[in-house]
Image (tube, rainbow, N blue to C red):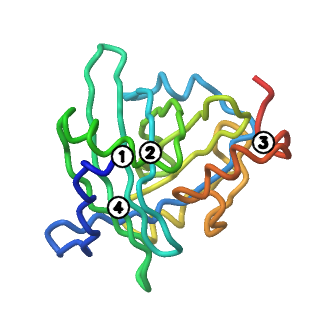
Amino acid sequence: MTSSSEPIPAFKMPTNQELLEDNARKFIVKSFDNSILEEGVTKSYSLETDWLEMDDATEKKLAYKKYPNGAIDILLISKATGPNGRVSQKEKITDEEYNRLLPGSVRHVVKVRHEFTHIQGDIQFEMKYDIFEGSKLQILEVDAKTDAERNGFNNNTFPGKIVEVTGDLRYYGYRIFDMLNDETNSGFGNAS
């Protein structure tokens, strides 16, 4: 950042009212049946992420979402990992705030995200399917209302071939940047 820039607000642990659980299961996508995106309501957008601060337990980043209709959402996101998992604090910010903070970016990732629901049995799962620009890596995040429901997701019956990487920190937050820039990532997904 330039010397005239204001400092980035310090991370604060979210209060109970602001607490958002961030403990979805993660999978590498080897193949994906795109027809699943047509089954329910799908929200798709391009997502540019710029990390401003990061360490082993916390990160602060900018998320710039651009939708096909031209609408834009800009968020400042703080995440912390603790004994009870990951939590997030998200705050909408203005273009001016975004432009003021962006020069402090230390890592930049671009992807297309598809958000949709998928039902197995009687459980509705919230899905986030990420396709990273310039890489074969594709990630599917699977979430549900409770830990028991989330753990009930059966990747063997999902329409596509996915391999679980939940808990492998290389696929979380700012660390994904290293995975995308690792020249050995040719083993990820399809060569689309």
Marks 2 and 1: in contact by CB < 8 Å? Answer: yes
Q: Residues within 10 Å of mark 4 (few under 14, many from 20)?
A: few
Percent x, y of residue 99: 28, 36
Cα separation between marks 3 and 1: 26 Å
Query: Which numbered tag is attached to residue 62?
Result: 1
Q: Secondary structure at mark 2?
A: strand
- Relative depth, front residue between 165 and 109: 109
Tell me: 6 left or right of 158: left
Q: Amino acid at mark 3?
A: Phe
Element class at badge 4: loop
- The residue beneath circle 4 is 145
SS for callout 1? strand
Q: Residue at x 76, y 37 (%)?
A: 189
At label 4, the amino acid type is Lys
Residue 159, labelled with which disc?
A: none
**Which residue is the site of mark 3?**
188
The residue lying at 39 percent from left, 71 percent from top is 80
- Give residue 9's quadrant in the image: bottom left
Work out which residue is located at the far bottom of the displayed protein and give it. Answer: 83
Q: Residue at x 19, y 44 (%)?
A: 92
Lower position in the chain sequence, tag 2 or tag 4: 2
Front residue of 41/48: it is 48
